[in-house]
Amino acid sequence: MVLGPPSSLPAAVLFGAHTTGGRIVREENRFRMQQSANSASGGNLAQKRLAREYELVYILTPNVDPDDAEKVSTRIQEVVSRLGGKITKVDQWGRRKLAYPIKKSSRGVFVFVKIVGYNDVVAELERNLRNFDAVMRFQTVRREGTFDLAEVTVDPEEAKFTRLEVAPADEEPEPSFEERLGLTARPPRERDDEMMSDIDDDMIPDLNAPAKPSKPAAGGEEPQA
């Protein structure tokens, strides 16, 4: 008994075909056509991969340097662009008081960013934000709905990061750990010193001076001691 070429054996075993050569050829052709159809449908699915919308809020230290804040925003833009996403809105809320102290700070600089991208963009963004000392806290929320990134339009003015201003010099500094516990007194602020310097010495009563005699009553009678 003479067997055919080795290449014909796997096809016959795979399709359970008879020894008829025409049947094997037809089964192989059908298998190739099915593979081509699956590849084509898979390519279309990859092209129509839908994205989700995410809202990111991160908090910077209250006295963050503007250059450090710019490094954080630049990294966010790089990560989103590299992973095929889009930043659709940026809103810098500025310095706000925190609901509770974070890293011994009672205030922070809030930045809101809206992103349209795939699931991997969130994990990569949060991984990068953890590496910045200037970032005290961050949170990402996924919104409802899916989007085709090719159809998402971006307004450059809405998605632009503005440079952070330097913290004002007259802003009250963060209290130390000892000051929070009441172990040490907080130094007076310069504003308080300026207000005290404007007060005339005559306006401050002398507690050691003798009491002045009181005036007589309206009826002319001397007040009783």
Image (spheres, rainbow, N blue to C red):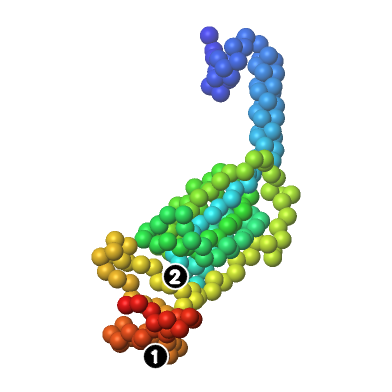
Answer above or below: position of 199 versus 7.
Answer: below
- Position of residue 93 in the picture relative to residue 36 (left or right): left
Q: Cα distance, mark 1 to mark 2?
A: 38 Å
Q: Residue 51 occupies which quadrant of the picture?
A: top right
Residue at 53% x, 46% y is 120
Q: Which residue is mark 2?
A: 63
The three-letter amino acid code for the residue at tag 2 is Asn
Q: Residue at x 40, y 62 (%)?
A: 105
Query: Residue 147: where, in percent of width, then height?
Result: 69, 44
What residue appears at the point 59 percent right and 48 percent down from the top-left corner? 54
Q: Is residue 74 visible?
A: no
Instruction: Give, as a three-letter code, the residue at label 1.
Output: Asp
Few, some or many residues within 10 Å of mark 2 (<14, 14–19, 20+): some
In the image, is 119 to the left or to the right of 65? right
Disc number lying in front (1 or 2): 1
Give the farthest residue toward the left: 183
**Left or right: 2, with 131 as reference point:** right
Q: Foreground residue, 46 or 64?
A: 64
Give the number of callouts: 2
Sequence-earlier tag: 1 or 2: 2
Residue 201: mark in rendering: 1
The answer to whether any part of residue 106 appears in the image is yes
Please, what secondary structure does the residue beneath circle 2 have? Answer: loop
Dots 1, 2 in contact, CB < 8 A: no
Who is closer to the viewer here, 31 or 141?
A: 141
